[in-house]
Image (cartoon, rainbow, N blue to C red):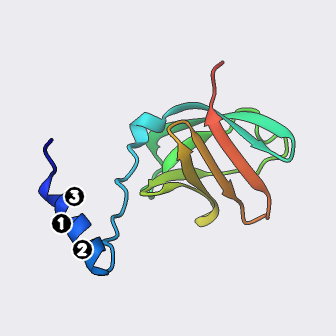
């Protein structure tokens, strides 16, 4: 059985009581997130599409809100991948951050106080 040096070093440090080393997760690839998703909150569900196209003058990507506006969801303008999830913005301010719970599932609480779940749409 082979053990990597990094694992061996981490085990040695943890045995000595030294603080654990924090590692920032890798940035999520926007191309892997492009496509149609279901967004749910408060018993309502809508469908939106994330694009890899950048919105002019920003480092964020565009969103096609599909039927979300009619369903009463916020008029999100852009999205961006972060190391631990997704950030959605409206007029330059972050209104919703969603943590990655699984490969095709994100959860978060918006500035409006509502809990949101976004999952890969199968339709």
> Along the line of sight, which residue is nearer the eye, 47 or 83?
83
- When asked about the image quadrant of residue 30, the answer is top left
What residue sits 79% from the left and 64% below the top? 113
What residue sits 34% from the left and 70% below the top? 22
Mark 3 and mark 2: span between their CA atoms?
Answer: 10 Å
Pointer 3 residue:
7
Mark 3 and mark 2 lie on one chain; the one further toward the N terminus is 3
Asked if marks 1 and 3 touch (Cβ < 8 Å), the reply is: yes
Asked if marks 1 and 2 touch (Cβ < 8 Å), the reply is: yes
> Relative to residue 19, is residue 97 depicted above or below?
above
What residue sits 76% from the left and 35% below the top? 46
Pointer 1 residue:
9
- Looking at the image, the residue that sits furthest to the top is 123
Count of marks, rendered view: 3
Pointer 2 residue:
13
Q: Residues within 10 Å of mark 3 (few under 14, many from 20)?
A: few
């Amino acid at each position: 059985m082979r053990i990597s040096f990094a694992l061996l070093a981490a085990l040695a440090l943890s045995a000595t009581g030294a603080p654990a080393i924090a590692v920032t997760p890798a940035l999520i690839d926007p191309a892997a997130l492009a496509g149609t998703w279901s967004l749910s909150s408060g018993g309502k569900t809508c469908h939106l599409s994330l694009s890899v196209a950048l919105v002019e003058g920003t480092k964020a990507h565009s969103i096609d809100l599909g039927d979300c506006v009619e369903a009463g969801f916020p008029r999100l303008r852009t999205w961006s991948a972060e190391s631990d999830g997704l950030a959605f913005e409206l007029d330059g301010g972050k209104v919703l951050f969603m943590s990655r719970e699984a490969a095709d599932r994100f959860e978060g609480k918006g500035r409006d106080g509502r809990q949101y779940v976004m999952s890969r749409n199968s339709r």
